[in-house]
Amino acid sequence: MGENIINYVKEIEEQRERFEYEIDGVVLKVDDFRLRDVLGYTSHHPKWSIAYKFESLRAVSKVIDIVVQVGRSGKITPVANIEKVLIAGAFISSASLHNQDYIDSIGLNVKDVVAISRRGDVIPAVELVVEKLSVGNFKIPNYCPSCEKSLIKEGAHLFCVNIHCPLKIMGHIKYFCSKKCMNIVGLSEKTIEFLFNMNFISSEIDLYTFDFDRLIGFKGFNFKRVNKLKRSIEESKNRPFKKLLLAMGIKDLGINTILLLINNNLNSFDAISLLCQDNKNALVKLLDIKGIGERIAFNIIRAFNDKIILDKFNFFQELGFKMQEDSMNCVVDSSFLFGKKFCITGSFDEYSRHVLIDKITKKGAIFSSSVSRYLDFLLVGKSPGLKLKKANNLGIKILSLFDIKNLVNLDD
């Protein structure tokens, strides 16, 4: 029986590229309903069903070039540009190389023939060098490709620490305008790049001082589009304070930590900035909040003593932005979920992951995209991936959607 199952899985895996739809695995189920009743269920899945994930599909391509990108934090990321190849229904022309250590581990350079995959059938990755057609390994320059300042190494990664680096500044503006932050509709990354390269804007502040009527006449900017941009920028002034705080791009300060601050009476710019005037007292106060560690606490204190960041907050305050969050809109349940770190695996018929994460974090839980020994629980849906196996090995609590519904009103 076991051998037949293994052969069946292999047969399906061999046929997956010929299907008219994408699959990433198979679900094996006991087909005897009486036996299903005997086997029963755990708290998160039926014992008579198990999912088997296939290895990520691969294709062979050639590295045309390796470029170095600069993120808004200054993190340097090498990216391989490859000859376009079709993998799992998508054309891939580039893939991240992570850092110098990864490049050295696979011995990669321009012109090499490589195996490309989409990890999880999503993320393009260079897996290995199939044929070495170059000499040596690619070396990331020790200077920033944008501002040409020397890079510093933190762990396995290189960083540009120049606060005036053009690509870092542009990255900050893009993040500020993004859907998760101020959600300025119409200001796409390409539009921001155009405005920045034309010297129309040099920071987030300029979005609120620039005369967008000057764009009328430029390619792609007619009267109607410009008016939509102006309206969207004006509407962004009404975003909640938690969105503005997130949009400032303070290192390690994500929405989960912001909700923790808000629900510990640090729900306004004045409250946080006043606290951070006394560094020692601020550190004690922040570390008293469950879910905030020393690194995040230091980053918050440093940010609220940074003149550039404070000047931005003061500018937005003068424009009438909301500088205080009503904690009633971010109620934290002080019971099971408060301060707990969680992750999600599998799919859910009734709710998207985005909705589940939003509802659970509003109860004070902290979302993590990966499973580690620091996780408090894993929320499991249909066809869970390897996260479930890892969580079980680490002895992490497993919760089902039914369990979560007993803790959170998901339909509220």
Image (tube, grey):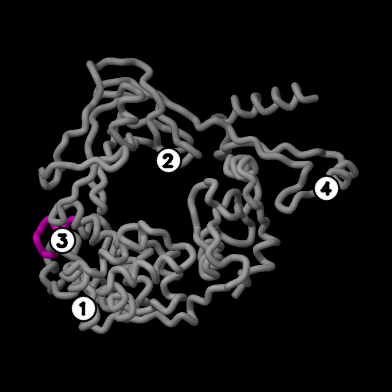
**Range of the magenta residues?**
193-201
Quick check: 55 left or right of 86?
right
| Location of residue 101 in the rendering, given as x and y in whole percent from the top left corner | 32, 30
| Location of residue 378 in the rendering, given as x and y in whole percent from the top left corner | 60, 52
For label 2, the residue is 123
Picture residue at 43% right of the left edge, 38% below the top? 90
Quick check: 73 left or right of 291?
left
For label 4, the residue is 40
Disc 3 residue type (three-letter): Leu
**What is the secondary structure assignment of the residue under circle 3?**
helix
Q: Is residue 245 magenta?
A: no
Disc 1 residue type (three-letter): Asn
Q: Quadrant of residue 210?
A: bottom left
For label 3, the residue is 195
Q: Is residue 197 magenta?
A: yes
Sequence-wise, which precedes: disc 1 or disc 3? 3
The extreme right residue here reads: 34
Mark 3–mark 2 Cα distance, whole angstroms, equals: 30 Å
Of circles 4 and 1, which is in front? 1
Of circles 3 and 2, which is in front? 2
Sequence-wise, which precedes: disc 3 or disc 2? 2
Disc 2 residue type (three-letter): Ile
Q: Quadrant of the N terminus?
A: top right
